[in-house]
Amino acid sequence: MIWNPFETLVPKKFLGIDIGTSFIKIVEISKLGNRRKLENYGEIESSALYEKPFRTLQKSTLFLSSKDIAKAITAVREEANMKTFQAVFSIPDFSTFFTNFELPLMGKEELPQAVRYQARQLIPLPLAEITLDWQLIEDRTSEDKKAGMKILLVAVPNEVINQYQEIARLAKIEMVALEAEVFGLTRALIKDDEKEVVAIIDIGAQSTTCNIIDRKILKTSYSFDISSNELTEVISKGVNVDYRKAESLKREYGIRPLDTIEEKIGQETRQVILPLVDLILREIEKIFNNFFQAEKREVKKIVLAGGLAFMPGLSEYFAQKFDKEIEVANPFLNVFCPPILEQRLKEMGPSYSIAVGMALRELKI
């Protein structure tokens, strides 16, 4: 091979695709050398196509047809002028089964069979209907080498995988990987040198997920049904406005302190959603307590992700309740982008965290 110092380097590029309940979000990120750059981004709302959402919490499969979702993805890519065809898709946490368990010390060649045997006891579906993935979690806090081996097990129904493969084929995209949302969140939001235990609270349209990460290793992931959409519905009924107006009130007033709200409708908005926000906090507190009892380590920082992260008053309310460092997700922090977009991307960050994390999967530095 002849070295050519004038040869143009071609950056690697990948798409990260997040098919959420109400939106499809796509980012195109490149890497040249050690620099990651945001090339393009775009989204489409399900209401732009139909009255129906892209998915529902009750079904593991997508609500709209693969053909419709593929058309939506193609429309976003064309509108944003995305040239990349290789993509990583995210799978929602409620379509994925997570669990941790321990095994006795054994050789690496014995592990796969032992994991599959344990999976039969833990997963309420036949193994023929699911795809398993697992990783060994190093227990660095334990000095007892005879304590056993900790395993993180992830299971995804094959029907979910098959539908994503069909969507990629119809959208003429090469699906290089399919990954649970939480791993994308961890990659995009947790620093490589983070030593403390961090909780990522992802308040999505249909569910809230609390993920606890210790040294970039997922220790627990728990989802519950209280969601951003439910807050909007409560406002709609409690303040007697239509759904779109309720969504607007949620984003304008949220749970700001009463002494900062002069308008009566803003005070009513806070009053009707505060009990639901308190319910979210109580669920999170239970998860934190269970984690501390099991691991003897305390969550030190909370990262708020999802479309609700910037709701007025939310981060301050979390800080008051938990007395911990609170951070609003910004997955674009270590991705180069034009300065003119910095404020816009900061505002978009919480809802684009999963898509960014998916693209970064194939752009490891």
Image (cartoon, rainbow, N blue to C red):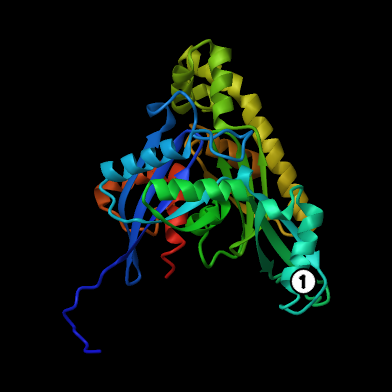
Tell me: residue 163, above or below residue 228: below
Q: Secondary structure at mark 1?
A: loop
Residue with the most extreme top position: 240
Tell me: residue 192, above or below residue 143: above
Taking the spot 60% from the left edge, 39% from the top edge, the residue there is 318
Taking the spot 46% from the left edge, 23% from the top edge, the residue there is 51
Amino acid type, callout 1: Ser
Q: Is residue 81 visible?
A: yes
Q: Is residue 293 visible?
A: no
What residue sits right under mark 1 in the picture?
142
Residue with the most extreme left position: 6
- Across and down, in percent, residue 218 comes to 63, 58
Quarter of the image for residue 286 reads: top right
- Across and down, in percent, residue 141 comes to 73, 69
Q: Nearer the viewer, residue 196 or 223?
A: 223
Indicate left or right for 157 with 259 as reference: right
Q: Nearer the viewer, residue 333 or 325?
A: 333
The C terminus, quarter of image: bottom left
Indicate left or right for 228 with 12 as reference: right
The N terminus, quarter of image: bottom left
Residue with the most extreme bottom position: 1
Indicate left or right for 306 with 287 as reference: left
- Across and down, in percent, residue 153 comes to 69, 59
Taking the spot 32% from the left edge, 39% from the top edge, the residue there is 75
Taking the spot 63% from the left edge, 42% from the top edge, the residue there is 94
Q: Nearer the viewer, residue 26 or 177?
A: 177
Tell me: residue 175, above or below residue 306: below
Tell me: residue 154, above or below residue 76: below
Q: Residues within 10 Å of mark 1 (few under 14, many from 20)?
A: few
- Across and down, in percent, residue 59 comes to 62, 36
